[in-house]
Each structure stands twice: as structure tokens, then as C-alpha cells.
């Protein structure tokens, strides 16, 4: 039986063999692998790109103090972007399941309609949830729009839920019983995080300070976005650091939400604030990309 | 040219199409046909298939007679004409017309090969299928379809009737070239199967694809029934179109979960896992809130796989594991939710948005309670209205949104609320469709009515009015629910008491729809009855029933003509009568005019009496009895006489006639033979 890390190794190997760059997790808190710049920004523009990475994803409201066998504050996704999506993308995907030890001839696999939309990112796509013996193991999405921009090349986003997948492979009912490394259980690695972050997010997060921080990160992002137009050498413009501020805002928003500190009316407003930052960032990134494409050798031909 | 008629096969191979969209797409393809020939259509989630037979190998040749200069113009003109059309002078012929003789020639256009026409027509046919939501996948400017197209089989039989000689109809859609290679089941089948029109279906079957939906449906139904499943029609449709090779298996769950309400277990199984529930045929049935009896659940479920079997039981085991986790969640939610009663949650509704511009569910609740009071709802109905939305704050409803209302009802019961209260909450979203029943109790009906009416009133207030396919708040369904409750519960609320302006018109439209489409009354009769007022719907129905019953007596079509005539006369004279004007009986002429007047007076008294006691049939027969006198009146009386006093009096006479005899139905709305010309 493969351990959690064995499964991760195999997935990475499988996709690396198919021309995918294997990245490391992004080092700013995100709610999903989609939000990492490797996805959110890289899907924009006309440059082909293939990348895969494990992304720990934080969802403060889903924390359960480590007491629920299936719900986690922080879960790990294996996130894959194939831009543009190859014609046989679904076959390649099924191949990856075989590669991690699922004999498809003995299981039941179904693709059930599940379109994806992230209002805070101005992003949506068309796709499925992939069901293996009744268990949702993957979200598959053909991105159509990101940051409010129609995409030039349509990427396939494949997001594997690693805890679910490995719990299935190992035949355990609780994620905490997953064997992470030989002789080491998931609970030994991650249980403390679940408990402590639940305590912080639900009970102790300082609401006033978080609101101030949200305002600060937002201000920094806005300040930067406002400078782009007059910035002389566009390729030097720090849009990546500006995007980090968006991610910070998003995580603080989620924490405030879990803390029950956001009223219904405020909620709509804050989502719009974050969305405006994300859309503004995407526009500038796309502009940088098109300028870069225009100056590349052979671009004039 | 060959006489042999050809077969045709088109298969569009796609990635998995959402099951619920497939029947609509097939209907479109069926109606479209191909080159005017009828087609049959089939589909699985991965392929749309169109078949036809009886296509000619080429279209018929056509011949046009091109006419040139008159013969009198001479040989020079003939030469010029011939040259211009690329023929020799010898090929010209003479065309004789009444105006004289002309040069002319027969231009023959050979019919084009059908295969060429098909190659041109198919891409547009395929990309023209209307889908609820499309995507692009080859790039921003690429074609849009429901899911990526990955292969295409397009074959036309050959004229020798030789099946190995099927011709590939050559075209390309989204970069995919048509060919003669199909694909089988994703896992069990081959990814490359050469086919001919004749071998196509057998080739698929060998590769674990059952092409015919009927066959898949039947396989699921038979197997699932044998395993004890209670077949649910809409789930059966979903499974039919989500699979290419369906096979049913039965799984077990711990009987301990049967403590949870059957509604919760069934929802988890059906909506979240697409499983059929299994009923325990040996246990005594439970009495449902709506009075029906239902079997208790057995600790089994039936899952439908998209594969041929589960010899090692791995799939069964996997599905059981998933269901166990889901049931655990449900049990956890149930226990957590019981820590705070519904009554204690009313204030929490202030934090649940009803609609951004319309405030919270607490605001809505306050309004609905007031409406229930206004409608004369008793204390239980008012209590139910107060608690009806509280389940929106529960974990159970947050997880299983389909169960709103039902969970509230179950919780109210568990928390000791009176039966009338819990049942009203349980049923207050009913009817969910025109097929669904209305709430079973008076309390439930009044709460359901008030809740829906409030939603409509508030949305209309801020201009959220459904138009075309845009109806995000499902207001049509709410309005239809109101109409169904009013009509079937016999609640005597006239339309004017419920709504005014645009909302009144919207409800009236739904009322019309209900009587026409659901109850099957003739549309002109519905128009006629509603045009003379829409009071309580029970009254509308009584008038409609009477009209439908007596209309075939024949006098009504004639009367309808007379009423239309009255309308025309009054309109042309621009006569706007008033109840304060009166008829000068001294100006009535002896003969048909006086006779009609006397008859009207005579009938009117009886008409009122019949109408007052709701005897619309006899009332209508009274009106029908007027026909000979009305006919005679119009045959001999001229309304537009010179004497203005007489003329005004006659117009008023007609006006009074129309006013007093249109209280059951406006007969001028009845469509007669004359209207169709």
C-alpha cells in the first residue's frame, strides 16, 4: 500500500513525464490551488504552460478542531494546469489514476457536471466532478474566464483532493488514519494544526485587528495597481507582489467570516473589494504578457 | 443516375455531456432532420447519433428555361445571347409567348452529390444545437459547444449497397476531421473501432456502449427493481444519460442510521449519491404528513455503475464507505441542530439574506406572519409562519438545501410543536410543480400562499420581474403555486385582493395558463370567463365548466357573433356608457326592438337568481334563449339613425345589454368561424 507521500510522488512523476513543471506550494496562504499565481496568473495570455504542485489550502470555516473525520481547515490539493488542454486530456487524467494504483477496470468512474465559479477571482469554467465509486476525487475544469478576462488558450485545471484520494486508496474512514509516511499517521503530522487553527479562527482571532490588516493589504495593493499606468519599464512592474496582497486580503476575509464577524451586507461589499483587486491584478499581468510576447524574437514575423 | 437510396450515420463524439441536457439536444436534431429527410436520434453522455435512410445519391437535376432577345432582333442578337451564356447558336430554341417569339435555351444543372451537401450542412447542424451553457476549448475564437468534440463518424452508404463501401462524408468541426472510427466505453472498450453503418451498433455493444436510451433505461429499471429499489423517475433519467453501460448493485448501511428521518436518508442517497432507496416491504407502512402511506426504508441502497460488474465487491465497498460518511454528517447535523429550538432561531433570521435589496428572512417572516393574519389564519398557522424559515439557520439545511421546509417540519415535531404547526412548516414550499400536490392542511395552505405572495410582491416592488427565460427567483413557479392552491383549496380570495398592477397581470397570466394547460379548458372560453372578472378561482372554474358544457348547444357561437357586433358598434360610435345614464323606454320601437327589450327584462330577473346561487349552467341557458330575438333585432334595427336621441338611446340599449349579460363570460371572446377567416 502506498503512503500519502508515495501517492504524491507518483502523481508528480506521472505529470512530470508528460512535460509538466513540478512546482512547490505557494508560500502565501490560499483557499485553493487555483488562487496561486501559478494558476490564477499563468492561465492568462497566449503562452502555453504546464504546471503541477501540491497546495495546502486553508478554509477557516471548514475547521472542526480535528474532530470530524472528513472536514479539514487545511487540506492538500494536487493542482494541475495544462494550458492549452491536450485533446486526450481525460485519457491522460485516467492514466494518472492508474499510475497511483487504481485499476479502473475494477472501479466505477463517472464524470458528473460541475461547473466552477469563483466570484472573488472573476473566474469561471466548465467541467465535472469526477466520481470514483461514488466518491468525488477530482474537480476538472476547462477555464473560460479569469480575472474577468476571456482566456486565449483554454487550460484544463485538474484538482485532486489528496486526502480523499489517499483515504480511498488506503481504505480508511478518517483522514487522520491515513498513513503519511511509513509508520507515521496523518494525525501525527497535521492534527495539531487542525485543533489550533480552529481555536484561533473560531474563538481567538482579533476581529478589529484583522479588519485593519485587511484594509492595509488592500491599500498596499491598490497603491501598486495605481502606479502601473505611468510606470516606465512595464516588465519591471511588481505585479506579483501586488497579487500577494490580494491573497492576504482573501485569507483575512475567510478568517473574519469563520469568526462570524462579517454581516450579510458587509459580505457582499468585501467580496467586491477583493474581486476588484484580483481583476485589476489580472489586467496588468495580461498586459505585461502581451508586451513581452510582442518583444520576443520572431514576434514581429 | 442510380435509384438506390442511401443510409446515413452521424456520430458526434464528445466528452461527457450533462445528462439533463441530452434529451433537449436530441429533440432539436430530430426536428431538424437532414436534407429534408426524417432522422432517428440516440445518445449517451459521450455521443450524439443521427441516423437516416432513404437519401438519394445525388439531388435531382434541374432545368431552367433562359429567355433571351426577341426573334425579331435577328441573328446578331442571337449570337450575342448564345455567347454570353456559353452555348452555341444551334443550342438555342424558340420560345413562343403571347408577346411574340424569343430566343431561349434550356440550362441544365446537374444535381449535386448528396455527400457534398451533407459535408456542407453537418457542421452548421451540429454547432446549431442550442445548449443551456456552452464553452470554448480550442481557443478564444474557437467554436462553442456543450463539451469538447473529440471524434466524428459521418458515413453515407454507397450506391452499390455494399456496406464495406460506406463513404466518409468529409468535413471538419473544431479541428476534428470526420471519419469511420468510433470509440467504446472509456474503460472497458477500445478507443479505436472501425465501423460501417451496418456494424455501428453491434461494434459499440461489443465495446460496452449501449446506444439506445430505452435499452439502458430498461436495464437499470429491471436490475434495480430486482435488487429492491424504489424507482424514482427523474433519477432513472439521470442515470440513463450519465452511463454508457449501466449495471445496478446493492449496498448495505448500518441499520442504526434508520433512526434518522427517511427524508434525510433519501435525500442523501438520491440527490447526493444518485442511489435508489430500498423500502422494507415487511415492516408496517408509515403515515405521511400528506395522508399517504409509505413503506419504511430498509438498510440498503441501489447504486448504478457505469461498468459491467463488481466481481470483487470493491465498488460496493467504496460506495458504502462514502454513504457512511454522509450519514455520519447528517446525524451530526441533526444532533447539533437540536441544541437550539426553531423558536430560539427566529432572531437569527436577521442574519440570513432573503435578497440583497429586500432585507433579511426576519423581515420576510414578519411580513408573512402579518399576511397570514390578514388571510384569517389561526394561531397554528401564524406560529407556522413565524417558524417556517428558521430551518435556514440549521446545519442540516445548510448541507442539504433541498430539504428546507421539510427539516423545519421534522424539527418542529421533534421539539413538541403542535401537529398542525409542524405539518404546515413541512409542506409550506408545496406545490413545487404543477404535478406536485398542494399542502394538505388549511394552515399549510395559508402559510404557503402568504410566503409565495410575499416573495412575488417584494420582487415586483424592486422590478425583479421575470422576462423570457430570466426568472432567477423562480417567480413563475411561486405564482403557479399560488394559483394551484387557490384553485384546489377553494380559498375564496379574489385576485384583486392579492395583487394589483403588473403583479395582477402576471398572476392572471398564470391563472389563464392553469385553466388552459393544466385543466384543459379551451383557450377562448378561458379568455371569455376571465374577461368578465376574476374573482375566487372556484367561481371562475364553475363559470368555465358551465360555459364548456352549454357551448356546444350552438346558440353561443351565434351569440358570440352578436356580442362582437355590439362591441364594434359601440367602438365605432365611440360610445362610453355609464351606469348613470338611463334608457328611455319611450323611444323604443315596437317590433324587434321592443320585443328584445321585453325579453331582456324577463330573462334578466331569472339570470340574477341563477347566478346568485351559482347555477351558471341555467344562467347561460337563459342567455342562450335570447338568440332568436337578438338575431331579429340586428336583422331589422338600424342603430345609426338620423335622430340623435334615438341613436344615443339605441347605443345605450346595446351597452346595457352587454353590461348585464357579460357577467359570466364575455362572449365576444369566443372564437367563431368568422374569426378564423
Image (cartoon, helix red, strand yellow):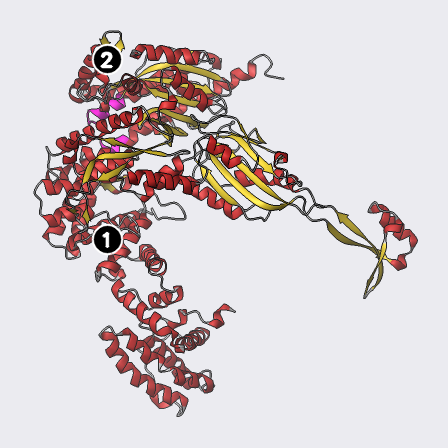
Q: In which quarter of the image is the N terminus of chain A?
A: top left
Q: Which of A143 and B201 is in front in this view?
A: B201
The residue carrying pointer 2 sits among few (fewer than 14), some (14 to 19) or many (20 or more) residues within 10 Å by Cα, namely some
Q: Quadrant of the C terminus of chain A?
A: top right
**Where residue B472 appears, x then y in whole percent?**
34, 43
**Residue sticking out furthest to the top:** A182
Q: What residue do we see at 40% from left, 80% from top? A: B651
Q: Which of B496 and A157 is in front in this view?
A: A157
Q: Is the magenta stretch mostly helix, strand or loop?
A: helix
Residue range of the region highlighted in magenta in the rendering: A252-267
The answer to whether the residue labelled 1 contacts the one labelled 2, judged by CB atoms less than 8 Å apart, is no
- Does the magenta portion include A254? yes
Quarter-of-image position of residue A65: top left
- Give residue B448's mark: none
**Where residue B479 appears, x then y in whole percent?**
30, 52
Q: What residue do we see at 15% from left, 21% from top? A: A203
Amino acid at each position: 500500500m502506498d503512503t500519502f507521500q508515495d501517492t504524491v510522488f507518483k502523481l508528480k512523476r506521472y505529470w512530470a513525464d508528460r512535460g509538466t513543471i513540478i512546482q512547490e506550494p505557494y508560500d502565501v496562504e490560499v483557499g485553493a490551488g487555483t488562487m496561486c499565481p501559478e494558476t490564477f496568473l499563468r492561465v492568462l495570455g497566449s503562452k502555453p504552460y504546464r504546471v503541477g504542485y501540491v497546495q495546502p489550502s486553508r478554509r477557516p470555516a471548514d475547521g472542526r478542531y480535528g474532530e470530524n473525520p472528513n472536514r479539514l481547515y487545511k487540506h492538500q490539493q494536487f493542482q494541475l494546469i495544462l494550458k492549452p488542454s491536450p485533446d486526450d486530456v481525460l485519457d491522460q487524467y485516467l492514466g494518472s489514476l492508474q499510475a497511483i494504483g487504481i485499476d479502473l477496470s475494477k472501479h466505477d468512474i463517472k464524470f458528473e457536471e460541475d461547473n466552477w465559479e469563483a466570484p472573488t477571482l472573476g473566474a469561471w469554467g466548465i467541467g465535472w466532478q469526477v466520481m470514483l465509486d461514488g466518491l468525488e476525487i477530482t474537480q476538472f475544469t476547462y477555464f473560460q474566464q479569469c480575472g474577468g478576462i476571456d482566456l486565449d488558450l483554454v487550460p484544463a485545471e485538474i484538482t485532486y483532493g489528496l486526502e480523499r484520494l489517499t483515504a480511498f486508496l488506503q481504505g480508511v474512514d478518517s483522514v487522520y488514519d491515513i498513513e503519511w509516511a511509513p509508520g507515521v499517521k496523518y494525525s501525527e503530522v497535521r492534527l495539531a494544526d487542525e485543533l489550533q487553527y480552529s481555536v484561533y479562527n473560531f474563538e481567538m482571532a482579533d476581529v478589529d485587528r484583522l479588519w485593519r490588516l485587511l484594509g492595509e493589504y488592500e491599500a498596499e495593493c491598490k497603491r501598486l495597481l495605481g502606479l502601473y499606468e505611468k510606470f516606465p519599464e512595464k516588465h519591471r512592474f511588481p505585479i506579483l507582489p501586488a497579487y500577494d496582497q490580494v491573497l492576504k486580503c482573501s485569507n483575512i476575509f475567510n478568517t473574519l467570516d469563520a469568526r462570524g464577524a462579517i454581516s450579510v451586507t458587509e459580505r457582499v461589499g468585501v467580496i467586491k473589494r477583493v474581486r476588484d483587486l484580483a481583476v485589476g491584478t489580472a489586467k496588468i499581468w495580461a498586459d505585461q504578457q502581451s508586451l513581452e510576447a510582442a518583444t520576443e524574437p520572431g514576434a514581429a514575423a | 443516375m442510380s435509384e438506390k437510396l442511401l443510409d446515413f450515420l452521424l456520430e458526434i463524439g464528445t466528452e461527457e455531456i450533462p445528462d439533463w441536457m441530452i434529451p433537449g439536444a436530441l429533440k432539436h436534431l430530430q426536428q431538424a432532420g437532414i436534407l429534408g429527410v426524417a432522422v432517428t436520434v440516440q445518445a449517451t453522455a459521450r455521443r450524439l447519433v443521427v441516423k437516416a435512410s432513404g437519401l438519394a445519391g445525388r439531388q435531382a437535376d434541374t432545368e431552367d428555361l433562359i429567355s433571351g432577345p426577341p426573334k425579331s432582333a435577328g441573328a446578331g442578337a442571337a449570337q450575342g445571347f448564345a455567347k454570353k451564356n456559353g452555348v452555341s447558336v444551334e443550342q438555342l430554341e424558340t420560345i413562343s409567348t403571347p408577346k411574340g417569339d424569343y430566343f431561349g435555351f434550356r440550362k441544365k444543372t446537374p444535381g449535386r452529390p448528396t455527400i457534398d451537401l451533407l459535408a456542407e450542412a453537418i457542421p452548421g447542424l451540429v454547432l446549431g444545437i442550442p445548449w443551456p451553457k456552452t464553452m470554448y476549448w480550442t481557443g478564444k475564437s474557437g467554436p462553442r459547444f456543450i463539451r469538447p468534440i473529440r471524434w466524428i463518424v459521418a458515413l453515407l452508404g454507397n450506391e452499390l449497397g455494399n456496406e464495406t463501401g460506406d463513404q466518409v462524408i468529409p468535413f471538419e468541426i473544431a479541428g476534428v476531421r470526420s471519419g469511420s472510427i468510433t470509440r467504446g466505453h472509456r474503460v472497458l472498450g477500445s478507443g479505436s473501432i472501425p465501423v460501417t453503418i451496418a456494424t455501428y451498433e453491434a461494434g459499440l455493444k461489443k465495446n460496452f456502449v449501449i446506444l439506445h436510451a430505452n435499452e439502458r433505461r430498461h436495464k437499470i429499471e429491471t436490475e434495480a427493481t430486482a435488487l429492491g429499489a424504489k424507482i424514482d423517475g427523474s433519477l432513472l433519467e439521470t442515470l440513463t444519460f450519465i452511463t454508457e453501460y449501466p449495471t445496478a448493485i446493492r449496498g448495505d448501511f448500518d441499520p442504526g442510521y434508520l433512526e434518522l428521518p427517511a427524508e434525510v436518508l433519501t435525500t442523501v442517497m438520491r440527490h447526493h449519491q444518485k442511489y435508489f432507496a430500498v423500502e422494507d416491504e415487511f415492516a408496517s407502512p408509515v403515515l405521511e404528513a400528506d395522508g399517504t402511506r409509505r413503506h419504511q426504508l430498509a438498510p440498503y441502497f441501489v447504486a448504478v455503475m457505469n461498468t459491467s460488474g463488481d466481481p470483487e465487491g470493491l465498488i460496493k465497498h467504496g460506495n458504502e464507505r462514502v454513504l457512511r460518511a454522509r450519514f455520519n454528517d447528517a446525524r451530526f447535523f441533526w444532533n447539533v441542530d437540536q441544541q437550539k429550538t426553531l423558536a430560539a432561531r427566529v432572531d437569527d433570521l436577521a442574519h440570513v439574506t432573503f435578497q440583497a435589496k429586500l432585507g433579511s428572512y426576519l423581515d420576510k417572516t414578519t411580513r408573512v406572519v402579518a399576511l397570514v393574519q390578514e388571510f384569517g389564519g389561526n394561531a397554528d398557522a401564524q406560529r407556522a409562519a413565524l417558524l417556517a424559515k428558521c430551518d435556514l439557520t440549521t446545519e442540516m439545511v445548510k448541507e442539504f438545501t433541498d430539504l428546507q421546509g421539510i427539516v423545519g417540519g421534522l424539527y418542529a415535531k421533534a421539539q413538541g410543536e403542535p401537529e398542525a404547526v409542524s405539518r404546515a412548516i413541512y409542506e409550506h414550499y408545496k406545490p413545487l410543480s404543477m404535478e406536485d400536490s398542494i399542502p394538505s392542511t388549511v394552515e399549510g395552505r395559508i402559510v404557503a400562499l402568504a410566503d409565495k405572495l410575499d416573495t412575488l410582491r417584494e420582487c415586483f416592488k424592486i422590478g425583479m420581474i421575470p422576462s423570457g427565460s430570466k426568472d432567477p427567483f423562480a417567480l413563475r413557479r411561486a405564482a403557479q403555486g399560488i394559483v394551484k392552491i387557490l384553485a384546489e383549496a377553494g380559498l375564496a380570495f379574489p385576485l384583486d385582493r392579492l395583487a394589483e398592477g403588473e403583479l395582477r397581470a402576471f398572476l392572471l397570466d398564470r391563472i389563464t395558463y392553469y385553466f388552459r394547460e393544466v385543466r384543459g379548458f379551451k383557450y377562448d372560453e378561458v379568455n371569455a370567463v376571465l374577461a368578465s372578472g376574476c374573482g375566487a378561482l372556484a367561481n371562475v372554474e364553475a363559470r368555465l365548466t358551465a360555459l364548456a358544457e352549454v357551448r356546444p348547444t350552438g346558440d353561443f357561437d351565434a351569440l358570440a357573433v352578436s356580442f362582437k357586433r355590439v362591441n364594434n358598434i359601440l367602438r365605432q360610435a365611440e360610445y362610453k356608457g355609464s351606469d348613470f345614464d338611463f334608457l328611455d323606454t319611450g323611444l323604443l320601437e315596437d317590433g324587434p326592438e321592443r320585443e328584445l327589450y321585453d325579453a331582456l327584462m324577463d330573462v334578466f330577473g331569472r339570470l340574477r337568481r341563477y347566478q346568485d346561487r351559482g347555477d351558471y349552467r341555467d344562467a347561460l341557458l337563459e342567455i342562450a334563449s335570447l338568440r332568436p330575438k337578438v338575431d331579429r333585432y340586428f336583422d331589422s334595427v338600424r342603430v345609426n339613425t338620423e335622430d340623435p336621441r334615438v341613436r344615443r338611446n339605441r347605443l345605450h340599449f346595446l351597452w346595457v345589454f352587454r353590461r348585464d349579460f357579460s357577467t359570466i363570460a364575455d362572449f365576444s371572446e369566443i372564437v367563431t368561424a368568422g374569426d378564423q377567416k
